[in-house]
Amino acid sequence: MSKKRPPRFRDVWVNQTELGKHFGMSAIAIGRKLIELGLRTLEKTPTEKSLAEDYCRFTPMKDGTPFYLWNKQKVAALLRSSGLPQLSKQEAEAYDTAKMLIATAREADETGMDKLFYFAVGEIKERDYPLINRFLAQLGSSLHLEEASADPE
């Protein structure tokens, strides 16, 4: 009989960016939602409730800067109960890819080196284009992935 391992720390506790990834939202948007839910103050610190009820954990950075991690399951359940739809694993991956493409395109524009951008696009399966395009549009990007033409000449 095998013993069930306890979950790893990083599987339980996540930052706002990681939490937002599962809802198609930025860390800032998740922060606003945490304020609405009474888990975070306007000063961007956790409320007494979030600390007392184990929604949040103080995890200072190595240099002592205050940093807080959020209980992924508990906060996600609260976000869902407030009406936010949680993304499927495939949607979360497409959201991440869209954000990566936007960042890579911005870097290519700034440096004039666009090979990395085209390499990144080349690694994406065409079947994923529609979902990634949905998130590119949702994120306000003018980027759009085009499927290769299927008609031979």
Image (cartoon, rainbow, N blue to C red):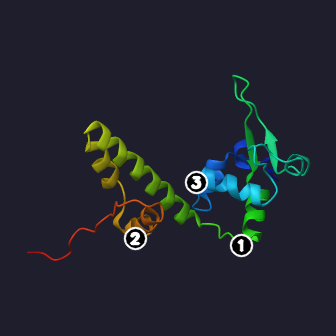
Left or right for 126, reference 83: left
Question: Please, what is the three-letter code of the amino acid marked with disc 2?
Answer: Pro
Please tell me which residue is depicted at 62% across the width and 62% down the height of the picture.
Answer: 23
Q: Circle 3 is placed at which residue position?
A: 26
- Ranked by sequence position, the earlier of labels 3 and 1 is 3
Q: Circle 1 is placed at which residue position?
A: 83
Q: Position of residue 53 (x, y in %)?
A: 90, 52
- Ranked by sequence position, the earlier of labels 2 and 3 is 3
* Closer to the eye: label 2 or 3: 3
Please tell me which residue is depicted at 58% across the width and 54% down the height of the picture.
Answer: 26
Mark 1 lies on a secondary structure that is loop
Q: Position of residue 124 (x, y in %)?
A: 37, 58
- Ranked by sequence position, the earlier of labels 1 and 2 is 1
Please tell me which residue is depicted at 59% across the width and 67% down the height of the picture.
Answer: 88
Q: Is residue 139 above or below residue 43?
A: below
Q: Is residue 8 visible?
A: no
Q: Circle 2 is placed at which residue position?
A: 130
Question: Please, what is the three-letter code of the amino acid marked with disc 3?
Answer: Ser
Q: Residue furthest left?
A: 153
Q: Is residue 85 above or below residue 113?
A: below
Q: Tell me if mark 1 has few (under 14), some (14-19) or many (20+) residues whose alpha carbon lies within 10 angstroms of its own.
A: few
Mark 2 lies on a secondary structure that is helix
The answer to whether the residues at label 3 and label 1 have Cβ atoms under 8 Å apart is no
Q: Tell me if mark 3 has few (under 14), some (14-19) or many (20+) residues whose alpha carbon lies within 10 angstroms of its own.
A: some
